[in-house]
Structures are given as C-alpha cells and as structure tokens.
Image (spheres, rainbow, N blue to C red):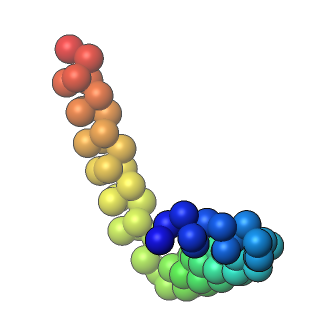
Amino acid sequence: MKWHRRKKLERFPHDGIERRISTETSHRLMRAMLDQNRVAVAKPRWPIVVVVGAVAVFVVVGILVGVMR
C-alpha cells in the first residue's frame, strides 16, 4: 500500500501545492500570533506578563544551577 502510494506520488508530483498550503497555514498562524500580541499590548496587562516571564526565567535558571551543581 505504501509502495503504491509512493509510486502514485512520484507519477503526480504535487509537492508544490502542499508547500503552498503549508506556507499559507504558517502565515495565518503568524498573523494570529501578531494579533494576539497586539491585543495583549493594547490591554493594560503587561505587568502580569512581565512577572510571569521573570518567574519562568528564575525557575529555568534555578533548574540549570541545580543540574550544574
């Protein structure tokens, strides 16, 4: 079954269509992430984000120090 599918794919090389679809989805994901960032910046919620980021960095550094020790 797999061999047959591979042969069919070789006969009809529609790799460009798949690549175009993947780039489209990645662009859509990037746009959604940018919209989310814009919303987060627009709302006065950045102190919470900063605190969460600091805690995450602190935890990561602590884990690294514990591993190195």
* Quadrant of the image occupied by residue 35: bottom right
The residue under the point 22% across, 23% down is 67
In this orientation, which residue lies closer to the viewer: 65 or 4?
4
* Residue 6 vertical position relative to residue 56 in the rendered view, above or below: below
11 to the left or right of 25: right
40 to the left or right of 24: left
The residue under the point 61% across, 66% down is 6
* Residue 24 vertical position relative to residue 15 in the rendered view, above or below: below
- In x, y percent, where is residue 66? 19, 24
- In x, y percent, where is residue 61? 31, 33
* Quadrant of the image occupied by residue 29: bottom right
The residue under the point 40% across, 66% down is 49
12 to the left or right of 68: right
In this orientation, which residue lies closer to the viewer: 58 or 33?
33
In this orientation, which residue lies closer to the viewer: 54 or 44?
54
Where, quadrant-wise, is the C terminus in this rendering?
top left
- In x, y percent, where is residue 33? 57, 76
From where the camera sits, is residue 31 visible? Answer: no
* Residue 46 vertical position relative to residue 52 in the rendered view, above or below: below
- In x, y percent, where is residue 34? 63, 77
The residue under the point 31% across, 39% down is 60
